[in-house]
Image (tube, rainbow, N blue to C red):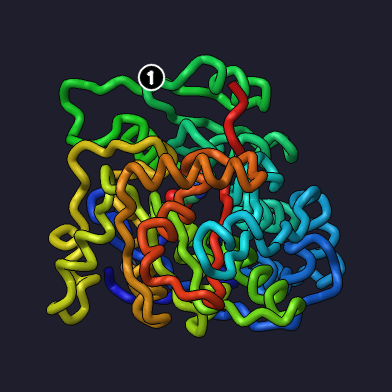
Amino acid sequence: MCGTSIDVSTPLSFRCPRASATDPHHVLHLVGAVDAPAADDPNPYVRYGPRLAWWAFARANGMTDAACEALTYEVADGFHVTPFERSSTLSDELGAEVWVKDETGNVAGSHKARHLVGILLHLRAAETLGLLGERPPLAIASCGNAALAAATLAGRVGWPIDVYVPTWMDDAFGDRLDELGARIHRCERHDDDPPGDPAMLRFREASWSGAVPFTVQGPENGMCLDGGRTIGWEIADQASEVGVELDRIVVQVGGGAFAACVGAGLGPDVRLDTVQAEGCAPLADTWARITEIDHPERYWAQVMRPWPEPRSLADGILDDETYDWIADVSVMAESGGSPIVAPEADIVAAHELATRAGYAVSPTGSAGLAGLLAIRDELRPGDRVAVVMSGVARRA
Ligand SMILES: Cc1ncc(COP(=O)(O)O)c(C=O)c1O
Ligand SMILES: [Zn+2]
Protein backbone atom coordinates (compact mmCIF):
# COMPACT_ATOMS: atom_id res chain seq x y z
CA MET A 1 0.00 0.00 0.00
CA CYS A 2 1.52 3.31 -1.12
CA GLY A 3 -0.68 6.01 0.48
CA THR A 4 -1.30 7.94 -2.77
CA SER A 5 -4.38 10.18 -2.59
CA ILE A 6 -6.64 11.08 -5.44
CA ASP A 7 -9.12 13.94 -5.65
CA VAL A 8 -12.77 13.00 -5.54
CA SER A 9 -13.41 15.11 -8.65
CA THR A 10 -11.48 12.61 -10.83
CA PRO A 11 -13.76 10.49 -13.03
CA LEU A 12 -13.65 6.68 -12.74
CA SER A 13 -11.24 6.74 -9.82
CA PHE A 14 -11.98 3.27 -8.55
CA ARG A 15 -8.58 2.00 -7.55
CA CYS A 16 -5.38 3.56 -6.24
CA PRO A 17 -3.66 4.94 -9.37
CA ARG A 18 -0.56 2.91 -8.51
CA ALA A 19 -2.40 -0.41 -8.32
CA SER A 20 -1.92 -2.80 -11.24
CA ALA A 21 -2.89 -6.35 -12.17
CA THR A 22 0.44 -7.56 -10.81
CA ASP A 23 0.49 -5.23 -7.78
CA PRO A 24 -3.09 -5.20 -6.48
CA HIS A 25 -2.28 -4.54 -2.82
CA HIS A 26 -3.39 -0.92 -2.72
CA VAL A 27 -6.18 1.03 -1.05
CA LEU A 28 -7.91 3.95 -2.73
CA HIS A 29 -7.63 7.23 -0.82
CA LEU A 30 -10.24 9.61 -2.18
CA VAL A 31 -10.01 13.12 -0.78
CA GLY A 32 -12.37 16.06 -1.05
CA ALA A 33 -15.76 14.70 0.05
CA VAL A 34 -17.46 16.84 2.68
CA ASP A 35 -19.38 16.24 5.87
CA ALA A 36 -22.98 17.39 5.68
CA PRO A 37 -26.03 17.23 7.94
CA ALA A 38 -28.63 14.53 7.33
CA ALA A 39 -31.62 15.66 5.26
CA ASP A 40 -35.13 14.69 6.28
CA ASP A 41 -35.76 11.98 3.68
CA PRO A 42 -36.55 8.26 4.01
CA ASN A 43 -34.09 7.36 1.25
CA PRO A 44 -30.57 7.13 2.77
CA TYR A 45 -28.94 8.17 -0.50
CA VAL A 46 -30.87 11.43 -0.37
CA ARG A 47 -30.69 11.74 3.41
CA TYR A 48 -26.88 11.44 3.46
CA GLY A 49 -26.29 12.17 -0.23
CA PRO A 50 -24.06 15.24 0.08
CA ARG A 51 -21.60 13.23 2.24
CA LEU A 52 -20.95 10.76 -0.53
CA ALA A 53 -17.98 10.70 -2.88
CA TRP A 54 -20.05 10.44 -6.06
CA TRP A 55 -22.04 13.54 -5.02
CA ALA A 56 -18.83 15.52 -4.40
CA PHE A 57 -17.55 14.29 -7.78
CA ALA A 58 -20.72 15.44 -9.53
CA ARG A 59 -20.75 18.82 -7.75
CA ALA A 60 -17.07 19.43 -8.53
CA ASN A 61 -17.79 18.78 -12.20
CA GLY A 62 -20.72 21.15 -12.43
CA MET A 63 -23.87 19.25 -11.44
CA THR A 64 -26.26 21.04 -9.09
CA ASP A 65 -27.49 19.58 -5.79
CA ALA A 66 -30.95 19.34 -7.35
CA ALA A 67 -29.56 17.31 -10.27
CA CYS A 68 -27.72 15.01 -7.83
CA GLU A 69 -30.94 14.46 -5.94
CA ALA A 70 -32.88 13.70 -9.12
CA LEU A 71 -30.24 11.19 -10.20
CA THR A 72 -30.41 9.57 -6.77
CA TYR A 73 -34.16 9.05 -7.11
CA GLU A 74 -33.52 7.39 -10.48
CA VAL A 75 -30.66 5.05 -9.52
CA ALA A 76 -31.29 4.52 -5.79
CA ASP A 77 -35.04 4.20 -5.92
CA GLY A 78 -36.43 1.77 -3.33
CA PHE A 79 -33.76 2.29 -0.66
CA HIS A 80 -35.26 3.16 2.72
CA VAL A 81 -33.73 3.61 6.11
CA THR A 82 -34.02 0.00 7.35
CA PRO A 83 -35.52 -0.95 10.74
CA PHE A 84 -33.49 -0.76 13.95
CA GLU A 85 -35.17 -2.23 17.01
CA ARG A 86 -34.60 -3.90 20.36
CA SER A 87 -35.27 -7.63 20.16
CA SER A 88 -36.81 -8.97 23.34
CA THR A 89 -36.20 -12.60 22.31
CA LEU A 90 -32.50 -11.96 21.73
CA SER A 91 -32.16 -9.74 24.80
CA ASP A 92 -33.75 -12.39 27.04
CA GLU A 93 -31.59 -15.11 25.55
CA LEU A 94 -28.31 -13.21 25.91
CA GLY A 95 -28.98 -11.34 29.15
CA ALA A 96 -28.14 -7.97 27.60
CA GLU A 97 -29.93 -5.31 25.58
CA VAL A 98 -29.70 -6.60 22.02
CA TRP A 99 -30.53 -4.22 19.17
CA VAL A 100 -30.99 -5.39 15.61
CA LYS A 101 -30.46 -3.54 12.35
CA ASP A 102 -32.57 -5.48 9.87
CA GLU A 103 -31.29 -5.48 6.30
CA THR A 104 -33.33 -8.44 5.12
CA GLY A 105 -35.84 -6.16 3.38
CA ASN A 106 -33.23 -4.00 1.69
CA VAL A 107 -32.86 -3.80 -2.11
CA ALA A 108 -32.00 -7.31 -3.41
CA GLY A 109 -32.39 -8.76 0.10
CA SER A 110 -29.13 -7.72 1.76
CA HIS A 111 -26.94 -4.78 2.65
CA LYS A 112 -24.78 -5.40 -0.46
CA ALA A 113 -26.58 -2.94 -2.75
CA ARG A 114 -25.61 -0.15 -0.34
CA HIS A 115 -21.98 -0.56 -1.37
CA LEU A 116 -22.69 -0.69 -5.08
CA VAL A 117 -25.20 2.07 -5.64
CA GLY A 118 -22.59 4.82 -5.09
CA ILE A 119 -20.46 3.35 -7.87
CA LEU A 120 -23.42 3.32 -10.22
CA LEU A 121 -24.31 6.89 -9.27
CA HIS A 122 -20.74 7.92 -10.05
CA LEU A 123 -21.01 6.27 -13.47
CA ARG A 124 -24.40 7.81 -14.26
CA ALA A 125 -23.12 11.22 -13.18
CA ALA A 126 -20.00 10.84 -15.35
CA GLU A 127 -22.21 9.84 -18.26
CA THR A 128 -24.56 12.79 -17.74
CA LEU A 129 -21.58 15.13 -17.57
CA GLY A 130 -20.17 13.78 -20.86
CA LEU A 131 -17.10 12.32 -19.13
CA LEU A 132 -17.66 8.69 -20.04
CA GLY A 133 -18.13 7.91 -23.74
CA GLU A 134 -19.48 4.44 -24.46
CA ARG A 135 -20.66 2.52 -21.42
CA PRO A 136 -17.98 0.10 -20.22
CA PRO A 137 -19.47 -3.17 -18.93
CA LEU A 138 -19.72 -3.74 -15.21
CA ALA A 139 -17.96 -6.82 -13.84
CA ILE A 140 -18.27 -8.76 -10.60
CA ALA A 141 -17.17 -12.16 -9.30
CA SER A 142 -19.84 -13.51 -6.96
CA CYS A 143 -22.55 -16.12 -6.79
CA GLY A 144 -24.27 -14.67 -3.76
CA ASN A 145 -25.86 -11.52 -2.44
CA ALA A 146 -23.32 -9.22 -4.09
CA ALA A 147 -24.09 -10.62 -7.56
CA LEU A 148 -27.80 -10.28 -6.95
CA ALA A 149 -27.41 -6.68 -5.81
CA ALA A 150 -25.11 -5.84 -8.72
CA ALA A 151 -27.41 -7.36 -11.34
CA THR A 152 -30.48 -5.71 -9.78
CA LEU A 153 -28.93 -2.25 -9.85
CA ALA A 154 -27.40 -2.63 -13.31
CA GLY A 155 -30.75 -3.86 -14.66
CA ARG A 156 -32.47 -0.73 -13.38
CA VAL A 157 -30.43 1.55 -15.58
CA GLY A 158 -29.89 -0.96 -18.40
CA TRP A 159 -26.13 -1.08 -17.88
CA PRO A 160 -24.42 -4.23 -19.27
CA ILE A 161 -23.03 -6.47 -16.56
CA ASP A 162 -20.83 -9.57 -16.60
CA VAL A 163 -21.08 -11.83 -13.58
CA TYR A 164 -18.21 -14.30 -13.10
CA VAL A 165 -19.30 -17.36 -11.16
CA PRO A 166 -17.82 -20.72 -10.15
CA THR A 167 -18.81 -23.80 -12.14
CA TRP A 168 -20.73 -25.18 -9.14
CA MET A 169 -23.16 -22.25 -8.88
CA ASP A 170 -26.69 -23.62 -8.60
CA ASP A 171 -28.92 -23.25 -11.64
CA ALA A 172 -31.77 -21.56 -9.78
CA PHE A 173 -29.45 -18.74 -8.81
CA GLY A 174 -28.21 -18.51 -12.39
CA ASP A 175 -31.82 -18.19 -13.54
CA ARG A 176 -32.38 -15.24 -11.22
CA LEU A 177 -29.30 -13.46 -12.53
CA ASP A 178 -30.41 -14.24 -16.04
CA GLU A 179 -33.87 -12.76 -15.39
CA LEU A 180 -32.16 -9.60 -14.21
CA GLY A 181 -30.37 -9.35 -17.56
CA ALA A 182 -26.85 -10.25 -16.39
CA ARG A 183 -24.38 -12.08 -18.64
CA ILE A 184 -23.19 -15.10 -16.70
CA HIS A 185 -19.73 -16.61 -17.11
CA ARG A 186 -19.11 -19.98 -15.48
CA CYS A 187 -15.38 -20.01 -14.84
CA GLU A 188 -13.39 -23.20 -15.10
CA ARG A 189 -9.84 -23.48 -13.91
CA HIS A 190 -7.32 -23.32 -16.78
CA ASP A 191 -4.08 -25.31 -16.64
CA ASP A 192 -1.96 -22.18 -16.66
CA ASP A 193 -4.01 -20.32 -14.02
CA PRO A 194 -2.25 -19.09 -10.90
CA PRO A 195 -3.72 -20.32 -7.59
CA GLY A 196 -6.99 -18.79 -6.44
CA ASP A 197 -10.64 -18.72 -7.40
CA PRO A 198 -11.01 -18.88 -11.22
CA ALA A 199 -14.10 -16.60 -11.13
CA MET A 200 -12.03 -13.99 -9.34
CA LEU A 201 -9.19 -14.41 -11.87
CA ARG A 202 -11.53 -13.88 -14.82
CA PHE A 203 -13.15 -10.91 -13.10
CA ARG A 204 -9.71 -9.36 -12.55
CA GLU A 205 -8.77 -9.90 -16.19
CA ALA A 206 -11.98 -8.19 -17.30
CA SER A 207 -11.56 -5.30 -14.88
CA TRP A 208 -7.99 -4.65 -16.03
CA SER A 209 -9.18 -4.70 -19.65
CA GLY A 210 -11.72 -1.91 -19.41
CA ALA A 211 -14.67 -3.30 -17.42
CA VAL A 212 -15.74 -1.39 -14.31
CA PRO A 213 -15.03 -3.37 -11.14
CA PHE A 214 -18.60 -3.38 -9.80
CA THR A 215 -17.67 -5.19 -6.66
CA VAL A 216 -17.83 -5.07 -2.89
CA GLN A 217 -14.10 -5.41 -2.34
CA GLY A 218 -12.28 -2.22 -1.48
CA PRO A 219 -8.97 -3.00 -3.23
CA GLU A 220 -10.88 -3.66 -6.49
CA ASN A 221 -13.12 -0.63 -6.14
CA GLY A 222 -12.58 1.66 -3.17
CA MET A 223 -15.80 3.49 -3.93
CA CYS A 224 -17.78 0.56 -2.49
CA LEU A 225 -16.53 1.65 0.93
CA ASP A 226 -18.15 5.05 0.49
CA GLY A 227 -21.89 4.33 0.08
CA GLY A 228 -21.67 1.40 2.51
CA ARG A 229 -21.24 3.90 5.34
CA THR A 230 -24.95 4.74 5.13
CA ILE A 231 -25.64 1.71 7.33
CA GLY A 232 -23.44 3.07 10.11
CA TRP A 233 -24.94 6.55 9.81
CA GLU A 234 -28.43 5.09 10.01
CA ILE A 235 -27.63 3.06 13.13
CA ALA A 236 -26.05 6.11 14.80
CA ASP A 237 -29.07 8.31 14.04
CA GLN A 238 -31.65 5.67 14.94
CA ALA A 239 -29.95 4.85 18.25
CA SER A 240 -29.80 8.50 19.16
CA GLU A 241 -33.48 9.02 18.20
CA VAL A 242 -34.51 6.37 20.74
CA GLY A 243 -31.99 7.60 23.31
CA VAL A 244 -29.82 4.48 23.30
CA GLU A 245 -26.06 4.73 23.59
CA LEU A 246 -24.71 1.57 22.04
CA ASP A 247 -21.71 0.03 23.79
CA ARG A 248 -20.79 -2.45 21.15
CA ILE A 249 -21.60 -3.83 17.70
CA VAL A 250 -20.59 -7.25 16.42
CA VAL A 251 -20.28 -7.53 12.65
CA GLN A 252 -19.82 -10.55 10.40
CA VAL A 253 -16.88 -10.43 8.02
CA GLY A 254 -16.32 -12.04 4.64
CA GLY A 255 -14.32 -9.74 2.39
CA GLY A 256 -14.44 -7.11 5.12
CA ALA A 257 -16.06 -4.15 3.33
CA PHE A 258 -19.22 -4.38 5.41
CA ALA A 259 -17.52 -4.15 8.82
CA ALA A 260 -15.25 -1.36 7.55
CA CYS A 261 -18.30 0.65 6.52
CA VAL A 262 -20.31 0.00 9.68
CA GLY A 263 -17.31 1.21 11.68
CA ALA A 264 -16.63 4.24 9.50
CA GLY A 265 -20.29 5.30 9.69
CA LEU A 266 -20.79 4.64 13.38
CA GLY A 267 -17.54 6.16 14.59
CA PRO A 268 -15.03 5.03 17.23
CA ASP A 269 -17.28 5.51 20.29
CA VAL A 270 -19.04 2.21 19.66
CA ARG A 271 -16.77 -0.79 20.12
CA LEU A 272 -16.75 -2.82 16.90
CA ASP A 273 -15.87 -6.51 17.04
CA THR A 274 -15.69 -8.54 13.86
CA VAL A 275 -16.86 -12.17 13.56
CA GLN A 276 -15.73 -14.95 11.30
CA ALA A 277 -16.59 -18.64 11.50
CA GLU A 278 -13.94 -21.00 12.84
CA GLY A 279 -13.86 -22.65 9.40
CA CYS A 280 -12.68 -19.43 7.75
CA ALA A 281 -11.04 -16.87 10.01
CA PRO A 282 -8.17 -15.18 8.19
CA LEU A 283 -8.76 -11.80 9.85
CA ALA A 284 -8.20 -13.14 13.38
CA ASP A 285 -4.96 -14.72 12.16
CA THR A 286 -3.82 -11.44 10.66
CA TRP A 287 -4.74 -9.59 13.85
CA ALA A 288 -2.56 -11.99 15.84
CA ARG A 289 0.32 -11.66 13.37
CA ILE A 290 0.45 -7.87 13.38
CA THR A 291 0.52 -7.11 17.11
CA GLU A 292 4.25 -6.43 17.05
CA ILE A 293 4.45 -4.85 13.58
CA ASP A 294 4.52 -1.14 12.81
CA HIS A 295 2.73 -0.32 9.58
CA PRO A 296 1.49 -3.85 8.89
CA GLU A 297 -0.11 -2.57 5.65
CA ARG A 298 3.39 -2.56 4.18
CA TYR A 299 3.56 -6.33 4.57
CA TRP A 300 0.18 -7.21 3.06
CA ALA A 301 1.11 -10.53 1.46
CA GLN A 302 2.92 -11.71 4.58
CA VAL A 303 0.24 -10.79 7.10
CA MET A 304 -3.02 -11.50 5.23
CA ARG A 305 -2.76 -15.12 4.13
CA PRO A 306 -5.50 -16.96 2.23
CA TRP A 307 -7.40 -19.47 4.38
CA PRO A 308 -6.73 -22.92 2.95
CA GLU A 309 -10.15 -24.62 3.02
CA PRO A 310 -12.98 -22.25 3.98
CA ARG A 311 -15.94 -24.06 5.46
CA SER A 312 -19.10 -22.97 7.28
CA LEU A 313 -22.87 -22.97 7.09
CA ALA A 314 -22.44 -19.20 6.77
CA ASP A 315 -21.42 -19.61 3.15
CA GLY A 316 -21.54 -15.91 2.26
CA ILE A 317 -18.52 -15.17 4.44
CA LEU A 318 -16.17 -17.81 3.10
CA ASP A 319 -13.84 -15.36 1.39
CA ASP A 320 -10.42 -16.94 1.83
CA GLU A 321 -8.87 -13.47 2.20
CA THR A 322 -10.28 -10.52 4.08
CA TYR A 323 -9.65 -8.04 1.25
CA ASP A 324 -10.48 -5.00 3.39
CA TRP A 325 -8.43 -6.13 6.36
CA ILE A 326 -6.61 -2.80 6.71
CA ALA A 327 -9.85 -0.89 7.18
CA ASP A 328 -11.22 -3.62 9.46
CA VAL A 329 -8.13 -3.57 11.65
CA SER A 330 -8.33 0.18 11.90
CA VAL A 331 -12.04 0.33 12.89
CA MET A 332 -11.40 -2.34 15.53
CA ALA A 333 -8.26 -0.68 16.86
CA GLU A 334 -9.86 2.78 17.00
CA SER A 335 -12.98 1.54 18.80
CA GLY A 336 -11.29 -0.93 21.18
CA GLY A 337 -12.69 -4.01 19.45
CA SER A 338 -11.13 -7.24 18.29
CA PRO A 339 -11.89 -10.25 16.06
CA ILE A 340 -14.17 -12.99 17.37
CA VAL A 341 -13.92 -16.50 15.93
CA ALA A 342 -17.32 -18.15 16.26
CA PRO A 343 -17.42 -21.93 16.70
CA GLU A 344 -19.52 -23.55 13.97
CA ALA A 345 -22.04 -24.64 16.62
CA ASP A 346 -22.68 -20.96 17.38
CA ILE A 347 -23.17 -20.18 13.67
CA VAL A 348 -25.85 -22.86 13.58
CA ALA A 349 -27.41 -21.84 16.91
CA ALA A 350 -27.45 -18.15 15.93
CA HIS A 351 -29.36 -18.94 12.78
CA GLU A 352 -31.97 -20.91 14.73
CA LEU A 353 -32.23 -18.21 17.37
CA ALA A 354 -32.52 -15.36 14.85
CA THR A 355 -35.23 -17.27 13.00
CA ARG A 356 -37.07 -17.86 16.28
CA ALA A 357 -36.75 -14.15 17.03
CA GLY A 358 -38.67 -13.46 13.82
CA TYR A 359 -35.95 -12.68 11.28
CA ALA A 360 -36.11 -14.41 7.89
CA VAL A 361 -32.33 -14.28 7.75
CA SER A 362 -29.67 -16.52 6.15
CA PRO A 363 -26.95 -18.17 8.27
CA THR A 364 -24.51 -15.61 6.87
CA GLY A 365 -26.85 -12.78 7.75
CA SER A 366 -27.14 -13.95 11.37
CA ALA A 367 -23.42 -14.60 11.84
CA GLY A 368 -22.99 -11.41 13.88
CA LEU A 369 -25.32 -12.97 16.42
CA ALA A 370 -23.05 -16.04 16.42
CA GLY A 371 -20.30 -13.69 17.56
CA LEU A 372 -22.50 -12.52 20.43
CA LEU A 373 -23.20 -16.14 21.41
CA ALA A 374 -19.47 -16.79 21.38
CA ILE A 375 -18.83 -13.94 23.85
CA ARG A 376 -22.01 -14.31 25.90
CA ASP A 377 -20.04 -14.83 29.13
CA GLU A 378 -18.61 -11.33 28.75
CA LEU A 379 -22.02 -9.68 28.42
CA ARG A 380 -23.63 -7.99 31.44
CA PRO A 381 -27.27 -7.04 31.97
CA GLY A 382 -27.72 -3.53 30.67
CA ASP A 383 -24.97 -3.82 28.04
CA ARG A 384 -26.31 -2.35 24.80
CA VAL A 385 -25.08 -4.43 21.92
CA ALA A 386 -26.08 -4.40 18.26
CA VAL A 387 -26.01 -6.89 15.43
CA VAL A 388 -27.00 -6.61 11.79
CA MET A 389 -29.24 -9.21 10.16
CA SER A 390 -27.53 -8.57 6.87
CA GLY A 391 -29.21 -10.88 4.36
CA VAL A 392 -32.53 -12.60 3.82
CA ALA A 393 -32.96 -16.38 3.87
CA ARG A 394 -32.54 -17.59 0.32
CA ARG A 395 -35.67 -18.81 -1.45
CA ALA A 396 -35.45 -22.54 -2.10
C1 LIG B 1 -25.61 -11.43 4.09
C2 LIG B 1 -24.17 -11.05 4.15
N1 LIG B 1 -23.69 -10.54 5.30
C3 LIG B 1 -22.40 -10.20 5.42
C4 LIG B 1 -21.50 -10.35 4.39
C5 LIG B 1 -20.09 -9.95 4.60
O1 LIG B 1 -19.75 -8.76 3.94
P1 LIG B 1 -18.24 -8.49 3.52
O2 LIG B 1 -17.90 -9.49 2.45
O3 LIG B 1 -18.23 -7.10 3.00
O4 LIG B 1 -17.41 -8.68 4.74
C6 LIG B 1 -21.96 -10.88 3.17
C7 LIG B 1 -21.02 -11.04 2.05
O5 LIG B 1 -21.27 -11.68 1.06
C8 LIG B 1 -23.32 -11.23 3.05
O6 LIG B 1 -23.82 -11.73 1.90
ZN1 LIG C 1 -1.57 2.76 -3.62
User: Residue 118 vs residue 44: left or right?
Assistant: left
Camera-side residue of 394 and 11: 394
Q: Quadrant of the C terminus?
A: top right
Camera-side residue of 58 and 25: 25
Residue 394, x across and y down, in percent: 58, 30
Quadrant in the picture for residue 172: top right
Residue 81, x across and y down, in percent: 75, 60
Residue 221, x across and y down, in percent: 46, 55
Q: Amino acid at mark 1?
A: Trp
Residue at (36%, 58%) from the top-left corner? 374
Image: 12 above or below 267? above
Q: Is residue 221 visible?
A: no
| Number of numbered callouts drawn | 1
User: Residue 324 vs residue 210: left or right?
Assistant: left
**Residue topped by disc 1:** 168
Image: 55 above or below 131? below
Residue at (50%, 69%) from the top-left corner? 249
Camera-side residue of 161 and 332: 332
Name of the residue lying farthest toward the top: 171
Residue 350, x across and y down, in percent: 47, 47
Residue at (44%, 43%) from the top-left corner? 349
Q: Is residue 164 visible?
A: yes
